Image (cartoon, grey):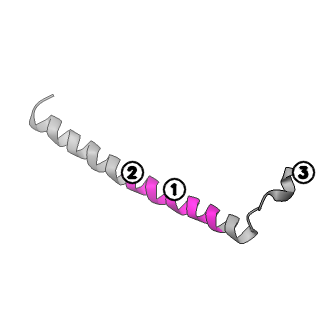
Amino acid sequence: MEYSKVQWPKKEEIVNSTLWVIVMSLVLSVYLGVFDLIASRLLKVLVSLFGG
């Protein structure tokens, strides 16, 4: 069968890849949260300055 030709990843590679995805997801969500907070406050300031 074709399955015998497949080189399956080792457990260590799977764990490392999973941890990498989790860490990068957390970093990206913090980055986007901070960006959203700054953008919303900036928008409130601009609206209060120029009326609205």
- Residue 39 circle label: none
Among the 4 quarters of the image, the one containing residue 21: bottom right
Amino acid bearing label 1:
Ser
Amino acid bearing label 3:
Met
Mark 3 or 2, nearer chain start: 3
Q: Using a 10 Å C-alpha cutoff, classify the residue at mark 1 as few (fewer than 14 neighbours), some (14 to 19) or many (20 or more).
A: few
- Outermost residue on the top side: it is 52
Please state the horizontal and vertical placement of residue 45, each as a whole percent of the image: 17, 42
Please state the horizontal and vertical placement of residue 16, each as a whole percent of the image: 63, 68
Q: Is residue 9 left or right of residue 2?
A: left
Report which residue position mark 1 lands on.
25
- Outermost residue on the left side: it is 50
Report which residue position mark 2 lands on.
33
The local secondary structure at tag 3 comes to loop
Please state the horizontal and vertical placement of residue 50, each as a whole percent of the image: 9, 33
Please state the horizontal and vertical placement of residue 12, each as a whole percent of the image: 70, 71
Report which residue position mark 3 lands on.
1
Q: Which residues are magenta?
A: 16-33
Amino acid bearing label 2:
Gly
* Alpha carbons under labels 3 and 1: distance apart: 37 Å
The local secondary structure at tag 2 comes to helix
Q: Residue at x 45, y 60 (%)?
A: 27
Among the 4 quarters of the image, the one containing residue 9: bottom right
Mark 2 or 1, nearer chain start: 1
Q: Using a 10 Å C-alpha cutoff, classify the residue at mark 3 as few (fewer than 14 neighbours), some (14 to 19) or many (20 or more).
A: few
Residue 19 drawn above or below residue 29: below
- Depth order, front residue of 39/12: 12
Mark 3 or 1, nearer chain start: 3
